[in-house]
Image (cartoon, grey):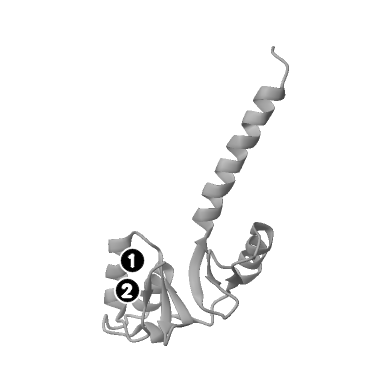
């Protein structure tokens, strides 16, 4: 989970994303999640609007992003992704403190592992041909 402040420049955000091989940075102020900036935000907001690279994250971030609790199951999480039209969802604890992030890529990897396990069950239970 990569975080930055609302004052962080979009140039720095791009560099942070590149250095950490991530597609988003969570924007935190006073230990509170206030937004998220994605690589798509940088492309659409900065490039197409020709914003200065010193533009702060606060000017391009998605404010009050969709979040889920640590207890949220995969089915509910994917439903929130679908309805929120997002690929990344920050995770917060009972106090609302940021504890992590789940991405669509994370879910695909998880489901791939589950599908491989199910395939093994089928293979071991299937009669020999």
Q: Residues within 10 Å of mark 1 (few under 14, many from 20)?
A: some
- For the residue pair 106 and 12, the one nearer the viewer reads as 106
Up the image or down, 99 lies above or below 108; here it is below
Rounded to the nearest whole Å, what is the CA distance between mark 2 and mark 1? 6 Å
Tell me which corner region of the image, top left, top right, bottom left or bottom right, holds residue 29: bottom left
Looking at the picture, tell me which residue is in the foreground, 100 or 79. Answer: 100
Q: Residue at x 47, y 80 (%)?
A: 35
| Location of residue 3 in the rendering, given as x and y in whole percent from the top left corner | 38, 74
Residue in view at x 49 percent, y 66 percent: 101
Read off the residue under disc 2: 13
Q: Are marks 2 and 1 in contact (CB under 8 Å)?
A: yes
Residue 26, position as x, y percentages in the image: 43, 74
Q: Is residue 32 left or right of residue 95?
A: left
- Looking at the rendered structure, the number of numbered marks drawn on it comes to 2
Quadrant where the C terminus sits is top right
Question: Which picture quadrant has residue 123?
Answer: top right
From the viewer's perspective, is 55 left or right of 24?
left
Q: Is residue 20 above or below residue 119?
A: below
Vertical relation: 111 (above or below) 103: above
Quadrant in which the N terminus is drawn: bottom left
Up the image or down, 94 lies above or below 23; here it is: below
Q: Left or right of 29: which side holds 66?
A: right
Task: Name the secondary structure under disc 2.
Answer: helix
Disc number placed over residue 42 in the picture, else none: none
Q: From the top left corner, tell me how far across and down residue 106 is, in percent.
A: 51, 54
Residue receiving disc 1? 17
Could you tell me which residue is drawn at 42 percent across and 79 percent down? Answer: 27
Q: Nearer the viewer, residue 2 or 70?
A: 70
Q: Report helix, strand or loop for mark 1.
A: helix
Within 10 Å of disc 2 (Cα), the crowding (few <14, some 14-19, many 20+) is many
Q: Which residue is found at the position 38% from the left and 69% from the top?
A: 2
């Amino acid at each position: 989970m990569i975080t930055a402040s609302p004052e962080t420049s979009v140039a720095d955000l791009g560099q942070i994303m590149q250095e950490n091989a991530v597609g988003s940075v969570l924007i935190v102020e006073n230990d509170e999640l206030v937004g998220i900036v994605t690589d798509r935000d940088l492309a659409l907001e900065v490039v197409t609007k020709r914003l200065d690279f010193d533009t702060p994250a606060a000017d391009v971030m998605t404010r009050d992003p969709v979040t889920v609790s640590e207890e949220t199951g995969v089915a509910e999480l994917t439903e929130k992704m679908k309805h929120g039209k997002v690929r990344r969802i920050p995770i917060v604890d009972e106090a609302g403190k940021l504890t992590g992030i789940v991405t669509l890529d994370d879910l695909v990897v998880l489901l791939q592992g589950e599908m491989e396990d199910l395939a093994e069950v089928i293979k071991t239970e299937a009669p020999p041909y």
